[in-house]
Image (tube, grey):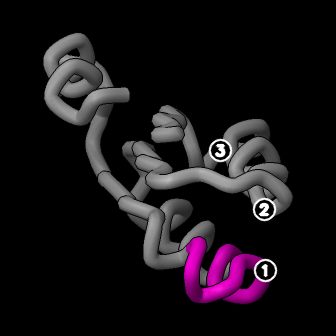
Amino acid sequence: MKILITGAAGSIGSVFVKRFKQFNFNKMILIDKDENQLTELNRNLLLIFNSNKINKLTFICSDINFLDITNFIINNNI
């Protein structure tokens, strides 16, 4: 299972991401436009996820308005 979460570093998004600790996933792509919050989320996940799950995370710092989200989903088989 591949998961895409936009706004991943925000208040709701970060709680949502942390809840996936209990689930098995193949890849999780985390998108947020705030580089500092995304870095902070990465630091928090390093503390609570095991190394196997950390290796399945991809962090993208970008404003979703500048992404072609439809093609992104198709190209990444989400």
Q: Secondary structure at mark 3?
A: loop
Q: Nearer the viewer, mark 3 or mark 2?
A: 2
Q: Are marks 1 and 2 in contact (CB under 8 Å)?
A: yes
Corner quadrant of residue 78: top left
For the residue pair 12 and 74, the one nearer the viewer reads as 74
Q: CA distance from mark 3 to mark 2?
A: 17 Å
N-term-proximal mark, 1 vs 2: 2
Q: CA distance from mark 1 to mark 2?
A: 8 Å
- Decide if residue 5 is on the left or right side of residue 45: left
> Where does label 3 land, which residue?
10
Image vertical order of residue 3 relative to residue 19, above or below: above
Mark 1 belongs to which amino acid? Ile
Image vertical order of residue 42 relative to residue 62, above or below: below
Mark 2 belongs to which amino acid? Lys
> Where does label 2 land, which residue?
21
Q: Secondary structure at mark 1?
A: helix
For the residue pair 77 and 69, the one nearer the viewer reads as 77
Image vertical order of residue 60 relative to residue 75, above or below: below
For the residue pair 20 and 62, the one nearer the viewer reads as 20
Q: Main secondary structure of the magenta part?
A: helix
Q: Nearer the viewer, mark 1 or mark 2?
A: 2
